[in-house]
């Protein structure tokens, strides 16, 4: 059972989602505005947020950013009628872990929620020694990512993804394998969230290297996109 915050202004949709999640045993709080959601999380910290982006009082993307700041470990799933790839990417980069396009199919929603709630972070299962490639070190035990001695702040799934890639540095990993290992073996739906998480990891590693200063030469492994297959974290000579 998970503590769920449902943020949905449509009465019919909200009622259907609320009923489905309660039937599955979740503890659900349903609010209808972004402002109410931000107030609610002050005294109740949900495990999972189901967030409609089309809210009457605030832009859902702004709500997502605020919720991510307040709930760094919670899973945030967007509900959006905005089907363009750019809208989805903006929402994911604002802090969401996943998205569903309206009209939502309940079977798909419940499968996604089970995957997010059931799966512990991959890094917690990998209790191995720190792995170093060039000036990048990933320590699964402490869940630390370090570039040239500087900690890099990654969100939970970003860390899990990087830990999975570096554990097989130099090897090609398929999209399906990464989704199974980092998200869930029975993942239901598109894998765009993987691409956004890879982009976020690349950006944060590059920023950490830049912050070390131009006088410091950083040997940072690249994450290569393998079109039609997946990704590979390159070895550093």
Image (cartoon, rainbow, N blue to C red):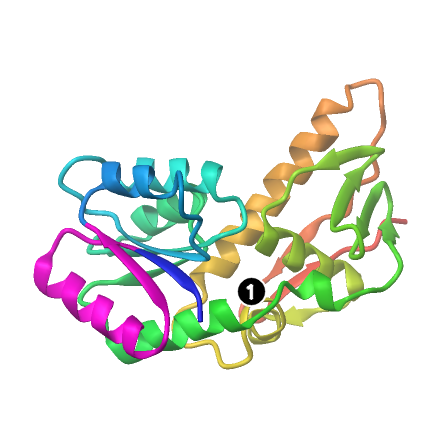
Rendered view: 89 above or below 214: below
Answer above or below: position of 142 versus 69.
Answer: below
Q: Which residues are magenta?
A: 6-31
The residue that disc 1 covers is 227
| Number of marks in picture | 1
Q: Residue at x 29, y 72 (%)?
A: 22
Q: Secondary structure at mark 1?
A: loop
Residue 43 occupies quadrant = top left
Q: Position of residue 233 (x, y in %)?
A: 73, 57
What percent of the width, then of the height, locates residue 67?
40, 41
Q: Nearer the viewer, residue 46 or 137?
A: 46
**Looking at the rendering, which quadrant does residue 1 occupy?**
bottom left
Where residue 57 sits: x, y (%)?
Answer: 16, 35
The residue drawn where x is 63% and y is 44% is 154
Residue 125 at what x, y percent from top left? 73, 68
In the image, farthest residue toward the front: 43
Q: Is 66 situated left or right of 107 in this image?
A: right
Is 72 left, or right, of 169 in this rendering?
Answer: left
Can you tell which quarter of the image residue 113 is in? bottom left
Viewer-nearest residue: 20 or 108:
20
Question: Is residue 130 among the parts visible in the rendering?
Answer: yes
Inspect this view and state whether residue 170 appears.
no
Q: What residue is drawn where x is 44% and y is 66%?
A: 2
Tell me, yes or no, whether the highlighted magenta stretch contains residue 26: yes
Look at 85% across and 23% down and name the residue there.
216
Residue 24 falls within the magenta-colored stretch? yes
Q: Residues within 10 Å of mark 1 (few under 14, many from 20)?
A: few
């Amino acid at each position: 059972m998970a503590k769920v915050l449902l943020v949905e202004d449509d009465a019919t949709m909200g009622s259907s989602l609320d009923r489905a999640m309660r039937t599955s045993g979740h503890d659900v709080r349903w609010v209808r505005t972004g402002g109410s959601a931000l107030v609610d999380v002050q005294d109740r910290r949900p495990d999972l947020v189901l967030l409609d982006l089309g809210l009457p009082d605030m832009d859902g993307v702004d709500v997502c950013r605020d919720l991510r700041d307040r709930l760094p470990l919670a899973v945030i799933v967007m509900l959006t009628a905005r089907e363009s790839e750019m809208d989805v990417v903006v929402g994911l980069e604002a802090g969401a872990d996943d998205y569903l396009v309206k009209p939502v199919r309940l079977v798909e929603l419940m499968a996604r929620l089970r995957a997010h709630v059931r799966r512990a972070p991959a890094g917690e299962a990998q209790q191995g020694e720190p792995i170093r490639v060039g000036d990048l070190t990933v320590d699964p035990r402490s869940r630390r990512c370090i570039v040239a001695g500087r900690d890099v702040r990654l969100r939970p799934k970003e860390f899990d993804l990087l830990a999975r890639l570096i554990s097989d540095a130099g090897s090609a990993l398929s999209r399906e394998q990464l989704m199974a290992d980092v998200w869930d073996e029975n993942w239901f739906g598109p894998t765009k969230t993987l691409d956004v998480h890879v982009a976020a990891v690349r950006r944060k590693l590059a920023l950490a290297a830049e912050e070390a200063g131009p006088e410091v030469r950083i040997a940072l492994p690249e994450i290569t996109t393998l079109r039609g297959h997946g990704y590979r974290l390159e070895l550093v000579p």
